[in-house]
Amino acid sequence: MTLAVVEPEFGLNLGYVARTMANFGLQKLIVVSPKRLDRKRLDEAKLFASHGKKLIDEIKFVPSMARLREKFPLLIGTTAIEGTRKANLTRKTLGVEECACKVADRISARPSTSCIVLGRDTTGMTNEELKSCDYNMTIRASNEYNTLNLSHAAAIILFVFSEILQKNPTQTKEKTASTRKERERAILIFEELAEASEFQKFKSGLLTEAMTRLFDRGEPSLREIYLLMGLASKATSKIRRLSSQQS
């Protein structure tokens, strides 16, 4: 498993994150930032990384969440701010243990295919960045003050994930799972169906996000995805054919 940090602001926190990663045996740290970190911040990070100094020396940089998404089949976002409205699907989050169980079922013997993403030290991850992730999780702390320091959050998350993954080793049940690319194809076909059926345009973005979250949580098999795609495609064709006959 890999850990990424979005635009880290303080070398001290980045160093403690690297130290925590070393505690749990993680060997790859990624920084998501359009610009590389300056030498001062990297040197400060090394001071606090202890035995995780090697992770700071070998940091990989990617310029955006879109590029990070290309590298990993499974991204797990983190946020301290949960959605209070039902319509806020982006910030509908899982608890850490619940998320770890779902991830364990999906990655099986290939933990290198997943990446946990931590947000900025002060402002966390944006809605757009969270939308790039397959799961979003939160550490449910005190209602009065639920935002944890970056390295403290990393310690809790990595502890829970390591416990769950050790209990769920390589014999995890395998199914012919759909990939992210196939789920995205299915969503495009349903978007075409929505357009053909004159679904309200102002709700189209919400529909897309709802289907994305539904697919990610439900983990449909390849067979299930193809059945849904077939139904949506036939329905779209029939609606368009009837519309052309009437015009």
Image (spheres, rainbow, N blue to C red):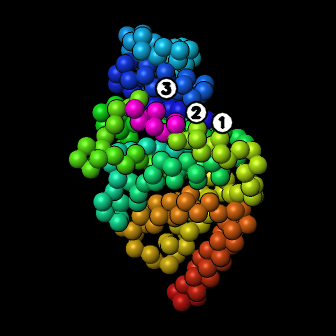
Q: What is the residue that sits farthest to the left in this orientation?
A: 144
Is residue 60 among the parts visible in the rendering? Answer: no
Label 2 sits on residue? 2
Q: CA distance from mark 2 to mark 3?
A: 13 Å
- Marks 2/1 in contact by CB < 8 Å: the verdict is yes
Q: In what quadrant of the picture does the N terminus appear?
A: top right
Q: Residue at x 50, y 78 (%)?
A: 197
Q: Helix or strand or loop: what does disc 2 sit on?
A: strand
Point out residue 205 in the picture as x, y percentages from the top left corner: 42, 62
Mark found first going from the N terminus, 3 or 1 = 3
Q: Is residue 158 magenta?
A: yes
Tag 3: amino acid: Thr
Question: Considering only vertical position in the picture, is 132 above or below 214?
Answer: above
Please provide the residue range marked out in magenta. Answer: 152-159
Q: What's the magenta bit mostly, secondary-structure-wise?
A: helix
Q: Residue at x 52, y 17 (%)?
A: 52
Would residue 124 be found to the left or right of residue 60 on screen? Answer: left
Q: Nearer the viewer, residue 53 or 192?
A: 53
| Label 2, residues with CA under 10 Å away: few <14, some 14-19, many ≥20 | some
Point out residue 46 in the picture as x, y percentages from the top left corner: 45, 12
